[in-house]
């Protein structure tokens, strides 16, 4: 003869069988996935904060981002492909520059510096062509 606990378990299984597919379908609708343009590399940024400035040059772009406390920079090649020399540098006023350089195919960075109430200057280069800024984001 079944006890009360086994009857209760048997009573819950039909409810779980109904709720599991519904919850799975709801999760698929609400969770972000690769939608139109969602699967591209340009869709997400590697720096936190809001995009502040973009400086274009012949072979790439120097992108700057800012939060309340930090500044972040990335150098992105206009034509991704084979690894080539790339550099990104970000310096807060009165501080040392944060530099990342090497051979990369698409982008170099991010570099982040603490820039609460401080100006920064940035430098980026791709294949020997570069762009630098004066003191900005003051």
Image (cartoon, rainbow, N blue to C red):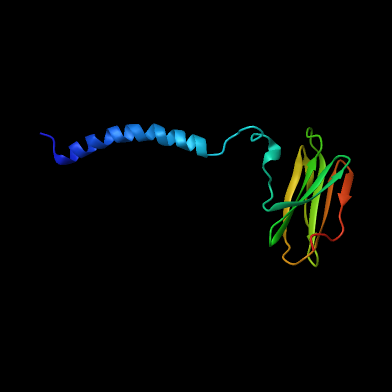
Give the mark count.
Answer: 0
Q: Is residue 48 left or right of residue 120?
A: left
Residue shown at 89% from the left, 40% from the top: 58
Direction from residue 120 to residue 128 in the image, left or right: right
Q: Relative to 106, does residue 118 appear above or below in the rendering? A: below
Q: Position of residue 19 (x, y in %)?
A: 36, 35
Q: Residue 114 in the image: x percent, y percent?
A: 71, 62
Question: Which residue shows up at 71% across the image and 39% down it?
Answer: 42
Quadrant of the image occupied by residue 25: top left
Q: Nearer the viewer, residue 135 or 98?
A: 135
Question: Quadrant of the image for the C terminus?
Answer: bottom right
Is 2 or 84 nearer to us in this picture? 2
Q: Position of residue 45 (x, y in %)?
A: 69, 45
Question: Is the residue 38 above or below the residue 73 in the image?
Answer: above
Residue 79, given in percent of the width and then of the height, sits at 81, 34
User: Image point 68% across, 39% down: which residue?
Assistant: 43
Name which residue lies at 44% across and 34% down.
24
- State which quarter of the image contains the N terminus: top left
Q: Is residue 97 visible?
A: no
| Viewer-closest of 115 and 126 | 115
Q: Left or right: where does residue 34 sit relative to residue 61?
A: left
Furthest residue in direction left, as rendered = 1
Using the rendered image of the protein, determine whether residue 65 is visible from the camera's viewpoint.
yes
């Amino acid at each position: 003869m079944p006890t009360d606990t086994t009857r209760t378990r048997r009573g819950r299984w039909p409810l779980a069988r109904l709720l599991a597919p519904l919850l799975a379908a709801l999760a698929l609708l609400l969770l972000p996935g690769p939608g139109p343009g969602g699967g591209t590399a340009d869709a997400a940024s590697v720096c936190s904060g809001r995009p502040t400035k973009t400086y274009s040059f012949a072979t790439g772009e120097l992108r700057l981002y800012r939060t309340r406390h930090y500044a972040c920079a990335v150098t992105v090649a206009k034509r991704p492909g084979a690894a080539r020399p790339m550099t990104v540098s970000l310096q807060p006023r009165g501080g040392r520059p944060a530099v990342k350089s090497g051979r990369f195919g698409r982008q170099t960075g991010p570099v982040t510096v603490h820039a609460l109430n401080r100006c920064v200057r940035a430098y980026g280069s791709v294949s020997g062509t570069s762009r630098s800024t004066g003191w900005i984001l003051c």
